Image: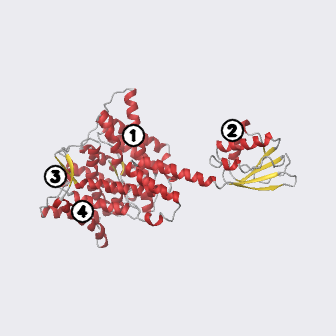
Amino acid sequence: MNKIKQFFLPEDGHFHKDFFSGLTVALALIPEAIAFALVAHVQPFVGLYAAFFMCFLTAVLGGRPGMISGATGSMAIVMVALVSKYGINYLFATVVLTGLLQILIGGLGLGKLIRIMPKPVMVGFVNGLAIVIFLAQLEQFKYHSGGQLLWLHGSALWMMIGLVFVAMMITHYLPKFVKALPSALIAIITVSLVVHFMHLDARVVEDMMQGHSLANSLPHFHMLSVPITMQSMAIILSYAVILCIIGLSESLMTLSLIDEMTHTRGKANKECVAQGIGNVVSGFFGSMGGCAMIGQSMINIRSGGRGRLSGITAGVALLLFILVFWSFIKLIPLAALVGVMFMVVIETFEWATFKFIRKIPFHDALVIVTVTAVTVFTDLAVAVVVGIIMSSLVFAWETAKKIHAKTSTTEEGAKEYMIEGPLFFASTSEFKGLFDYSNDPVEVIIDFKYSRVADHSAIDAIKSVTENYMKLNKKVHLRHLSEDCRVLLEKAGSMVEANVMEDPNYQVVTDAL
């Protein structure tokens, strides 16, 4: 019994917190799933069932309890092009292949690469997604009229703003008085009751359906129906790779963020596999798949959901809402859900950025701003790649400037260069400029005791230095090379025409060679 409890709940968790938090998340999943399904040009139930499968399966099988997955906008934006060009059957096949790729990545242990994520990239990611969530909520301030999408105005707009404000105030202040129930859930219920009993003409969930009907039966398994040709496989693979990268990027970044918030550590590889299983099942059951959702995950964590039970409850409750209670759920005011999501935006955005951005190095500030902007205007995967590349280039540049040499003359009259700092592709130019080829004596010792030969570019730089000395009939000795450095030199073969002093124990070599 204890093992079962530990599986579903965290060590200090409580059943009611995870249960009610899951109910809140289920309500928050509905408008998002419908909106993203419409973005992808598919029926609303395709997004709703995707939210169920992703939420439930990742909660049971995933490596980050408390994290919520579902249909997401970042993946829907890619899917719309696929559906428009090739049809929905290609979408389902692509989602299945996306899942298989994610399972492969998790099985190969590549999920751990999230650990190398620089802090500025993480801050930019959080801020960018907070802005994206905010902009997505603004769509609820619009309505369809005559085939056009128009902004609310007049009394309808003020009513929407007022109800959103009420939901935000309840979500923010209620925890100071009542902690037994999630404030977001109370906010949704309160605003719904106000709209119902005051007979307010407020926009509700049903208004998002745009005339689409909702399937009232369980999703069923069906085989994929796409032509088995090289052309179709190439199409599916190209989109699957993009969706795989986007899905895992958002999922693993969200996992890392929740790790920081809860002071626990999730299992990235296990989460990759769970995300993959969720997408495979989604594809075979006619839904659009998805990945982790930072907004709903924040709602869950802020509401006290820490264990797997919160995600499981959210998934099961969502399915019940669709199949059994839709006549009630469709009447929930959008303003209540928007108010809750606005509070998520406020709590997710790293407001301290405005304080420390002027105190941190310029390149770190540039990475934060760039990742935030790219996340907003393109997508998360591109933003993460751009941020990592920028951080890597900055690191390489700063590290390259640290290489230098201390020189001395031995009793035998040889010139000794004590190299300090790593020798790699970015520092090779500085390394080559350390030597005084024409004025040095015939014996030159290059000591790597405080350095490391890191890559092929470093080998090529050593080759260049030794050749310059050899042209002047001078002899070069390499000293204090670590085992990994010597391996690189051995692989280089005849590239390096220098005398290597063996010194496996890092003892100073005094043999005259």
Q: Position of residue 309 (x, y in %)?
A: 34, 56
Could you give the CA–CA distance between mark 1 and mark 4, rounded to whole angstroms?
A: 37 Å
C-alpha distance separating marks 2 and 4: 66 Å
Q: Amino acid at mark 4?
A: Val
Which amino acid, by three-letter code, is at mark 1? Thr
How many angstroms separate mark 4 from mark 3 (CA)? 23 Å
Of residues 142 and 4, which is closer to you in this image?
142
Tag 1 or tag 2, which sits nearer the N-term?
1
Disc marking residue 327: 3
Q: CA distance from mark 1 to mark 3?
A: 34 Å
Could you tell me if residue 348 is visible in this image? yes
Mark 3 or mark 2, which is nearer the start of the sequence?
3
Vertical position of residue 337 compared to residue 209: above or below: below
Q: Secondary structure at mark 1?
A: helix
Badge 3: how crowded within 10 Å, few (<14), some, or many (20+)? few
Secondary structure under the numbered disc 4 in the rendered image = helix
Hey, which quadrant is residue 329 in on the image? bottom left
Q: Which residue is mark 1?
A: 98
Q: Could you tell me which quadrant the C terminus lies in?
A: top right
Which residue shows up at 28% across the image and 66% down it? Answer: 171
For the residues carrying marks 2 and 4, which lies nearer the camera in this image?
Answer: 4
Residue ID for mark 2: 491
Task: Please give the residue where the numbered disc 4 appears in the rendered image.
Answer: 164
Q: Amino acid at mark 3?
A: Ser
